[in-house]
Image (tube, rainbow, N blue to C red):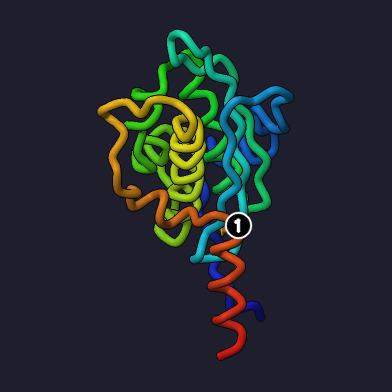
Amino acid sequence: MSSRVPLTYGKKVIELFKNPKNVGKIEGANAEALAGSLACGDMIAIYLKVDETSDKIIDAKFESYGCAANIAAASILTEMIKGRNLSEAWKISWKDVSDELGGLPQVKYHCGVLAVGALRRAIRAYYEKRQKPNWLPKELSQEERHALEEEKLMEILAKRSQK
Ligand code: FES
């Protein structure tokens, strides 16, 4: 008998896992980030097309190498941010994403955090060569620290496997 406890995913999570929206790359994206979770080693890429004059997100897509919860979270998050400007998108928390999904099982919270952290990394990347707005915190937010850049994630995972 398997000792695995089945996860209680809500209807919305299952629906978006089966039919995710906004999957893929954006050719000519002007902001993107690839980030991975230290909790599970999974990765996600976020692509944004931002209108340079209004800072409004015209298009958002993702590629997830994560679980059902991460795919559902990234799907709904990319829907939530389209048409919003970057400062509004920045304020979306993983809890907002989880609420919009009808809740995530506790052991899957980090999958939502990964999606939000990757989005924030993409927003930060957008401002790397532009004048930074006042609302952008200088310090990395908790979500960004969770959603590590690929190299950093690999470095930490490699160190862990040596132990
Ligand atoms: Fe890795 Fe969900 S378990 S993203």
Residue 79 placed where, x, y %?
A: 53, 24
Is the C terminus in the top left, top right, bottom left or bottom right quadrant? Answer: bottom right
- On the picture, is 150 further left or further right than 112? right
Circle 1 packing at 10 Å, graded few (<14), some (14-19), many (20+), is some
Assign ligand 1 to one image quadrant: bottom right
Q: Residue at 26% of width from left, 28% of height from top? A: 134
| SS of the residue under disc 1 | helix
Q: Quadrant of residue 75?
A: top right
Tell me: residue 57, above or below residue 138.
above
Q: Quadrant of residue 96?
A: top left
Tell me: residue 44, above or below residue 86.
below
Query: Is 98 in front, or is 58?
Result: 58
Is the N terminus in the top left, top right, bottom left or bottom right quadrant? Answer: bottom right
Q: Residue at 56% of width from left, 47% of height from top? A: 70
Q: Quadrant of residue 102?
A: top left
Query: Is 48 in front, or is 99?
Result: 48
Tell me: residue 163, above or below residue 17.
below
Which residue in the protein does label 1 denote? 150
Residue 16 placed where, x, y %?
A: 61, 35
Q: Residue at 72% of width from left, 32% of height from top? A: 24
- On the picture, is 32 further left or further right than 91? right
* Residue situated furthest bottom in the rendering: 163
Q: Amino acid at mark 1?
A: Glu
Residue 108 placed where, x, y %?
A: 47, 56
